[in-house]
Image (cartoon, rainbow, N blue to C red):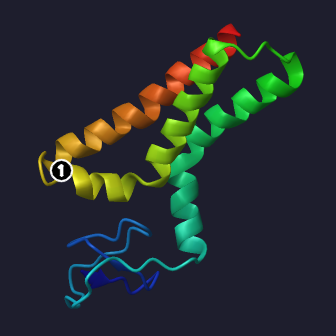
């Protein structure tokens, strides 16, 4: 764990802060058990950067419900569930990444997260547009 000099967050990274992209190479290692993320502008920008697509999928689904008023049948609930899963994966992608790296490599774990986030979001968009 290292403490970022720019955003003041303790992150589990060696070279670059995943929140603000500042270099951590010359920062000393700190003895923290887990990451400590502060609610500042860097974290809000990081959340916006990670969740924009999933949030857009949920927003399109909500607009579709408000404007078109479709029947709430199985296709709608599947689209809503896929959009919710996409949003959950994008919100908790750092935790999911750490859970996946015990079994898979870092590149494959990042690939799996991207597949779930963008794949489920795209499928939900298609289903929302079919309603």
- Count of residue discs: 1
Q: What element carries label 1?
A: helix
Q: In this view, does 1 lie to the left or right of 66?
A: left
Quadrant housing the N terminus: bottom left
Where is residue 69 shown, x and y percent of the image?
85, 18
Residue 57: image quadrant is: top right
Residue at 34% x, 59% y is 95
Where is residue 38 shown, x and y percent of the image?
51, 80
The residue singled out by tag 1 in the image is: 106
Disc 1 packing (10 Å; few <14; some 14–19; many ≥20): some
Residue at 44% x, 70% y is 20
Where is residue 107 shown, x and y percent of the image?
19, 45
Residue 107, relative to residue 60: is it above or below? below
Quadrant housing the C terminus: top right
| Nearer to me, 45 or 97 | 97
Residue 75, relative to residue 2: is it above or below? above
Residue 123, relative to residue 35: is it above or below? above
Residue 61: image quadrant is: top right
Residue 81: image quadrant is: top right
């Amino acid at each position: 764990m290292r403490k970022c000099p720019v955003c003041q967050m303790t992150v589990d990274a060696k070279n670059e802060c995943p929140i603000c992209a500042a270099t951590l190479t010359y920062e000393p290692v700190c003895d923290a058990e887990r990451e400590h993320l502060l609610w500042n502008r860097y974290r809000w920008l990081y959340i916006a950067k990670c969740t924009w697509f999933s949030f857009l999928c949920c927003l399109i689904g909500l607009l579709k419900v408000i404007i078109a008023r479709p029947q709430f049948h199985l296709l709608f609930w599947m689209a809503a569930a896929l959009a919710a899963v996409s949003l959950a994966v994008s919100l908790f992608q750092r935790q999911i990444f750490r859970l996946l790296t015990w079994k898979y490599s870092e590149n494959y774990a990042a690939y799996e997260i991207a597949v779930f986030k963008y794949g489920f979001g795209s499928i939900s968009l298609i289903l929302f547009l079919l309603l």
